[in-house]
């Protein structure tokens, strides 16, 4: 819509046109004082608008005068229901203190021209009716997909809106923000130290408002020493320092880095915790004997001071050499509560102490047996002593030579071992615990049963072991027994053999998570969960797999199946490859094939506003999605829900979803598949 006016008396320095857009948000357009007309673009078709015109002269605002008008109808051929041409990939490059380049993508020939509006947001966010932006405009021909904004203020955040126009009508828009560089690189702020331990501490800071490439964190002994430095990403806000000396004072600095430029340092001091003996325990308790055992400190001590006291018993004070890790206690009084304390001595200085209490004359469990032994499980049972302990320590040796320990509560008399290896001998030991005291163990041995495929790589091979019901089980990545993975196997759908790697069913699990959560998986595999991108990569790189998506809403059930499915490694941002659709849900996934995975805190596409943030999910977004199965559960607004476009569109959130994979050449033992 074009506005024109005349000036009875002048001149004016500039003019401001104000109006409310179709969403009721105030807008303002700054016009040079030598102009008497302006084209207002980016309006909605068939919509009435009221415009106010003010004149600005020597800092005073005069007016307003007003006018009303209604825009024309949408262009012929533009229909609703089908997605129209979309603007995408809004990004900023070549940022300086006074300019920046804005880049975008659009289908060839989709728009006649582009209108770019940019301005500085109102500094006050507390006003009930925010003042509108003072915006500038830039028209760009439809053949160009970038524009340089000049004469900007240094270190300033700008709001950007790009409209794609067909004739004078708005066909699509995309928004973002960008900040120009500050003339001087600012330092980080608010240096704090947390998680201070004997050999480590965490450094935290707030970034400056202007963009930085990275931060350099440096630390050294406060009284002199070789400084150590670590470079961290410009998005980082924290860094853990490791390998520190216990009980030492450190000087820590953090500087902002941009190119070859460094800011002034932000400096602070921290002191690590002095180390002493830890994990003190009383082992092999009998009627009159106990063995004190501890973990020595990182820095050697000259000697240990051992003190043992009990009501009504003579105190014991003894010394142990600095190389010792245990000390025997003899001639203890039966049924007596003892307190033992061990400190290290370095010259005249004592370290922090380690202390425990224990009681003599207690009985342990009896009759430890292994029952109901299967290829992967065994039920251990025992008889509880007359005086109930505070708990039990169950331990057994794994085939890899490691000892696995399980803490059990008081009152239990059985425990099922899960995830055992088939055809493997095991030896189990059970000790009663009173606080940090352990009685001598009782033990038993057993051998697990055999399986046709001892270490199945997927649910297809697990089905060959005779598994017929859908359930949780353990597979082994690449058939390697050192890489077990707990999974849920769907043994019923389309002949079974499906390994489920995603499920949404009740909204109880939060899927709005970071990159690392999606890399390693989260949730409950019997409920809602994401198995993890690392697992998907390990599975699909070791063989040919197909992928199936099952969707349900009430009594409706549809599926989409793809003959080929593969996920690349983390170095390739878990890029998705799939092809060969068939099914009843419509093909909403082929659009995403070839896309990298992105989450709210990491967008390998480097979009100004990432799809993951816009659509509240983590996915193989492109521009942006036709499937969003990790979106907000139950949401029906702004395309943010659990959607499958070619079944229910963007505004319907699917209540039940499962994504699953199985070998491409799978043949069910029961004849299906």
Image: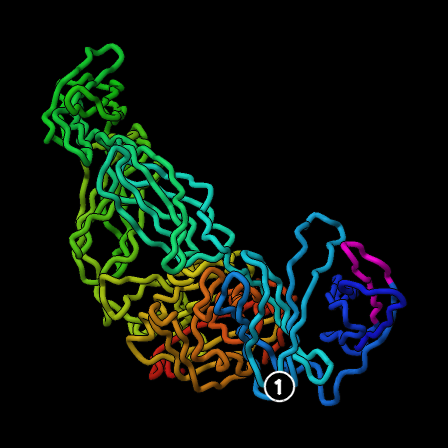
Magenta: main secondary structure: strand
The image position of residue 222, as x and y in percent, is 28, 34
Q: Which residue is mark 1?
A: 110
* Nearest to the observer: residue 322 or residue 325: 322
| Pick the front one: 43 or 211 | 211
Residue at 41% over, 76% down: 576
Is any part of residue 625 visible from this angle? no
- In the rendered image, residue 57 lying in the magenta stretch gets the answer yes
Q: Is residue 60 magenta?
A: yes
Above or below, comparing residue 325 to residue 602 in the picture: above
Would residue 262 be found to the left or right of residue 405 on screen?
Answer: right
Res 26 quadrant in image: bottom right
Looking at the rendering, in which quadrant would you find the N terminus? Answer: bottom right
In the rendered image, which quarter is residue 328 located in? top left
> Left of 551 or right of it: where is 204?
left
Left or right for 255, reference 359: right
Image location of residue 475, percent across then percent down = 30, 66
């Amino acid at each position: 819509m074009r506005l024109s006016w005349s000036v009875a008396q002048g001149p004016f320095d500039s003019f401001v046109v104000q109006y409310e857009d179709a969403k009721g948000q105030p807008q303002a357009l700054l016009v040079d004082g030598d102009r008497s007309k302006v084209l207002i673009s980016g309006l909605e078709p068939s919509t009435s608008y009221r415009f106010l015109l003010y004149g600005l002269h020597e800092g005073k605002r005069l007016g307003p005068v007003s006018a009303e008008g209604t825009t024309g109808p949408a262009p012929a051929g533009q229909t609703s229901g089908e997605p129209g041409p979309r603007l995408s990939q809004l990004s900023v490059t070549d940022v300086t203190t006074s300019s920046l380049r804005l880049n975008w993508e659009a289908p060839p020939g989709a728009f006649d021209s582009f209108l770019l509006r940019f301005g500085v947001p109102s500094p006050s966010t507390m006003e009930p009716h925010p003042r509108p932006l003072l915006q500038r405009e830039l028209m760009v021909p439809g053949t160009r997909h970038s524009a340089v904004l000049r004469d900007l203020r240094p270190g300033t955040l700008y709001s950007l809106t790009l409209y794609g126009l067909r004739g004078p009508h708005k066909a699509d828009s995309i928004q973002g923000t960008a900040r120009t560089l500050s003339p001087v690189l600012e330092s980080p702020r608010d240096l704090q130290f947390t998680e201070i331990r004997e050999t480590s501490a965490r450094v935290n800071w707030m970034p400056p408002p202007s963009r930085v490439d990275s931060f350099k964190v440096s630390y050294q002994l406060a009284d002199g020493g070789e400084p150590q430095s670590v470079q961290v990403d410009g998005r980082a806000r924290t860094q853990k320092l490791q390998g520190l000396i216990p009980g030492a004072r450190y000087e820590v600095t953090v500087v902002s880095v941009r190119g070859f430029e460094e800011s002034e340092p932000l400096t602070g001091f921290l002191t690590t915790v002095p180390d002493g003996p830890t994990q003190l325990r009383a082992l092999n308790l009998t009627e009159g004997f106990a063995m004190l055992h501890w973990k020595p400190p990182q820095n050697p001590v000259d000697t240990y001071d051992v003190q043992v006291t009990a009501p009504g018993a003579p105190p014991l004070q003894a010394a142990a050499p600095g190389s010792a890790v245990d000390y025997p206690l003899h001639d203890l009084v039966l049924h007596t509560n003892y307190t033992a304390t061990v400190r290290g001595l370095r010259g005249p200085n004592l370290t922090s102490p380690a202390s425990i209490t224990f009681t003599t004359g207690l009985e342990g469990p009896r009759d430890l047996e292994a029952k109901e032994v299967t290829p992967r499980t065994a039920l251990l049972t025992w008889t509880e002593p007359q005086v109930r302990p505070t708990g039990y320590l169950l331990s057994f040796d794994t085939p890899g030579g490691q000892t696995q320990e399980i803490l059990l509560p008081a009152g239990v008399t059985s425990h099922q071992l899960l995830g055992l290896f088939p055809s493997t001998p095991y030896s189990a030991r059970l000790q009663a615990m009173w606080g940090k005291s352990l009685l001598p163990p009782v033990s038993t041995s057993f051998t697990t049963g055999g399986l046709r495929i001892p270490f199945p790589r997927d649910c297809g091979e697990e089905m060959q072991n005779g598994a017929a019901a859908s359930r949780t089980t353990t597979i082994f990545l690449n058939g390697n027994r050192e890489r077990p993975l707990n999974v849920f196997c769907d043994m019923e759908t389309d002949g079974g053999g499906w390994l489920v790697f995603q499920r949404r069913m009740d909204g109880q699990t939060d899927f709005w998570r970071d990159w690392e959560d999606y890399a390693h998986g989260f949730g409950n595999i019997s409920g809602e969960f994401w198995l993890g991108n690392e697992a998907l990569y390990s599975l699909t790189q070791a063989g040919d797999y197909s992928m199936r998506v099952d969707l349900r809403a009430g009594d409706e059930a549809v599926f989409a199946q793809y003959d080929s499915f593969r996920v690349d490694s983390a170095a390739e941002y878990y890029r998705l490859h799939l092809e060969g659709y068939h099914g009843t849900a419509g093909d909403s996934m082929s659009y995403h094939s070839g896309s990298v995975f992105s989450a709210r805190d990491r967008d390998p596409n480097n979009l100004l506003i990432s799809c993951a943030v816009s659509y509240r999910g983590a996915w193989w977004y492109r521009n942006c999605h036709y499937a969003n199965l990790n979106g907000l559960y139950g949401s029906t607004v702004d395309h943010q829900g659990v959607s499958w476009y070619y079944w229910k569109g963007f505004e319907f959130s699917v209540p039940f979803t499962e994504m699953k994979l199985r070998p491409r050449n799978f043949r069910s033992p029961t004849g299906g598949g």
